[in-house]
Image (cartoon, grey):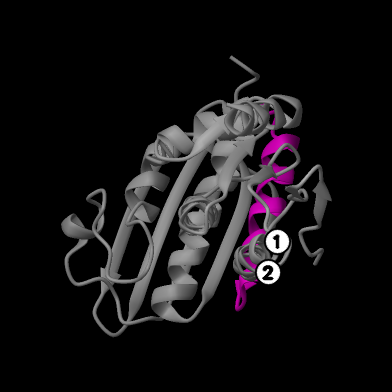
Amino acid sequence: MEARRRMDDATITIDTDADIVRARQIGREMAAVGGCGATDLTMVATAISEIARNMLTHAGGGIVDLSLVYESGRPCLLIVATDEGPGIEDLDQALQDGFTTGEGLGLGLPGARRLMDEFTISSHPERGTTVTMRKWCRPEL
Amino acid sequence: MAHVPVLRQRGYLIATIQATMTDSEAADLQDDLMEQVSRYRARGIVVDTTALDVLDSFAARTLRTIAHMTRLRGARTVLVGIQPEVAFAMVQLGITLEDVDTALDLEEGLELLDETFTE
């Protein structure tokens, strides 16, 4: 049986652009507690920023759940971002670099996927989108 | 949240971004710099990101827009102080800002502008 222990958690409601900053700051702090090095901390904060903005832009907001867990023998920051927006029609397309329906660069989802160790997304029309991401903490490389 | 302060020095505008910058602060900075370039007839702008925690796609797009818009008004913008971790994350994200001038720090940014305008 795999050992999984919850060490800390936080829930941030994304309602305004200031909440995006708050979510990435809290994520950074939690990953620091988990022992992540400076590069990982910045990658985590950047990925949270992209995902939270996506929710704000396309779904009018949502919830970012952060938890520091102990998984596969190491501390890991687990990020679950959930919105109740219109959903993403074509996930493959949304995960391609440069694809955008809004004003952005179209880097949000594919970029966040590259920044994290694990990235999964599920979406249902009219019911919303959930992005789950993990970063295992390691000291500076 | 803190507004991005813009100082004037030797005919240049120097914008020092704080530890965090929200999307609306980034948009305000863009308006501010465009307005000040005209008001002070500034030829050069340095945007210092030394303290900034994250340079995500929105912030990058705004900084690029600032560089392009001010260029059209006859000013040169140099982005300075992008930290190594931030640069690493930007490249992973897919942001290169290849069409924007950059320098290591404020000192080198000002040198670059001096070189531009003494030739």
Q: State the CA–CA distance, disc 2 to disc 1.
A: 6 Å
**Does the magenta run of residues contain A28?**
yes
Residue B32 percent location from the top left of the image: 68, 67
Viewed as shown, does residue A63 lie left or right of A37? left
Disc 2 versus disc 1: nearer the observer: 2
Across and down, in percent, residue A62 comes to 51, 75
Residue B63 visible at all: yes
The residue nearer to you, when weighing A88 against B57, is B57
Residue B86 left/right relative to A132: right
Q: Give the residue drawn at x 37%, y 40%.
A: B94
Q: Relative to residue B113, is residue B54 depicted above or below?
A: below
- Rendered residue at 39%/65% (across/down): A130
Looking at the rendered structure, the secondary structure element under dot 2 is helix
Q: Is residue A117 visible?
A: no
Q: Position of residue A27 (x, y in %)?
A: 65, 49
Percent x, y of residue A89 = 19, 72
> In terms of depth relative to the viewer, which is nearer, A18 or B6?
B6
Whether residue B77 appears in magenta in the rendering, the answer is: no
* Parent chain of label 1: A
In the picture, the disc for residue A22 is: 1
**Is the residue B86 above or below the residue A45 in the image?**
above
